[in-house]
Amino acid sequence: MKRRNFLGLMGAAGVSAALPTKAQAGGNVDFEGYPGSKGVLFDATRCIGCRKCEVGCNEVNNLPQPEKPFTDLSVTETTRRTENEAYTVVNKYETSGGPVFRKIQCMHCMEPSCGSACFVAAFTKEPSGAVTYDESVCVGCRYCMVACPFEIPTYTYNDPITPKVIKCDLCEANMQAGKIALPGCVNSCPKEALVYGERDELIKIARNRLEANPDNYIDHIYGENEVGGTSWLFISGVPFSEIGLREDLGTVSGPELNSGALSVVAMVPALWPLLLAGVYGITKRTDKINIKEKADAVAKAISETQDKASADMKAAMERAANDKAATVKREVAKVVKEAEEAAAAAAGGDGETEEEGA
Ligand code: SF4
Ligand code: SF4
Ligand code: SF4
């Protein structure tokens, strides 16, 4: 681990014990952030576009290998977005100061719009600074994708069974599990273009760099205040708009900016159970109707079959009875005839004998 990639390790240990709980969830418009929360500082003047951060992210998140290998740097010349299988990408921008590379991933907003737009609270602003996503409660409405001002969340449309939203989680799961000490991308950067640490410390470092080399930097820390602040921070030698960062977002957080509209959205959580219950009820009722219709149809078919069978049986029995009676009659007649013939024969024989004897 490079010291300069990871700031405030010891300080963080002390702070983490004092961190508040997750009760202050992302999306609260009055939320000012967790003290001691972490973030990453990206310095565009140091990035060489090597894509090692993409490799690091790919490895720690066990993502499949990309179609074109990470060694193919030509892909940076196409403006790429994050994807289901690439939580971060590095793009090259032709700027007023020449080619500049910029890394893209979730910004881990202090007051995430994705979180406030999500009415089942699938997103959480963690005390660590990460904005995490819980697929187990996600209903797939994809409001988060619409709400994100940085167009970060993607969706696994090709997974019909368990589709989910995908985005960088600041390596929260791996970090909390103790599997890694630094986000994979930060750990892999050979140029220290990425520094992980307490957000407040990162802002100080960024400011020091701007002050130490004012000719090399735009005098602004992107993310310090944009959309209410983000856990990822950017400094650059060229205007941020030239490296694909929106400069029209202002400093008001997404949730606050949209509080009017979101108050309407906020009704959805309250209505949602009723809506679901209604839909569920209708569905169930429809099912019941269908089942009843099917049951009635089956019962009718069975009844008709039974009636037909009964009629057939009755007819068959009658036929059999008639046949039997006819047979009996025929047999009786036959027996009677045979008896008569026998009797006649016997009578004739006796007669002959008597005649013969007379
Ligand atoms: S960048 Fe987008 S996805 Fe990431 S926390 Fe902010 S609003 Fe959510
Ligand atoms: S913080 Fe983790 S998940 Fe996010 S881009 Fe870096 S390596 Fe990938
Ligand atoms: S690893 Fe560092 S230098 Fe290389 S592309 Fe990523 S951020 Fe830039």
Image (cartoon, rainbow, N blue to C red):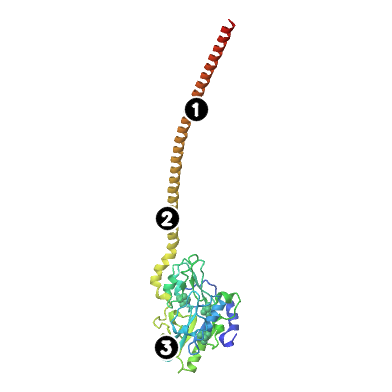
- Whether residue 337 is visible to the viewer of this picture, yes or no, is yes
The residue that disc 2 covers is 282
Q: Secondary structure at mark 3?
A: strand
| First reached walking from the N terminus: tag 3 or tag 2 | 3
Q: Which mark is first along the chain, 2 or 1?
A: 2
Q: Residue 319, image x and y in percent?
A: 46, 30
Q: How many marks?
A: 3
Mark 3 CB near ligand 3 (8 Å cut): no
Q: Nearer the viewer, mark 3 or mark 1?
A: 1
Which residue ends up furthest to the top in the rendered image?
358
Classify mark 2: helix, strand or loop: helix
Q: Quadrant of the N terminus?
A: bottom right
Badge 3 vs badge 2, beta-carbon distance below 8 Å = no
- Quarter of the figure with the C terminus: top right
Question: Is residue 105 placed above or below 334 in the rendered structure?
Answer: below
Judging by the rendered image, the residue that carries numbered circle 1 is 324
Instruction: Report the residue marked by disc 3.
Output: 94
Of circles 3 and 2, the one toward us is 3
Residue at x 54% of width, y 15% of height: 345
Q: Secondary structure at mark 1?
A: helix
Residue 58: quarter of image: bottom right
- Above/below status of 295 relative to 279: above
User: What residue sits 47% from the left and 34% below the top?
Assistant: 313
Spatial CA span between label 3 and label 2: 56 Å
Direction from residue 351 to residue 298 in the image, left or right: left
Alpha carbon distance from label 3 to label 1: 105 Å
Query: Disc 1 residue type?
Result: Lys
Q: Are the two marked residues, 1 and 2, in contact with CB atoms closer than 8 angstroms?
A: no
Residue type (three-letter) at the residue carrying disc 2: Ile
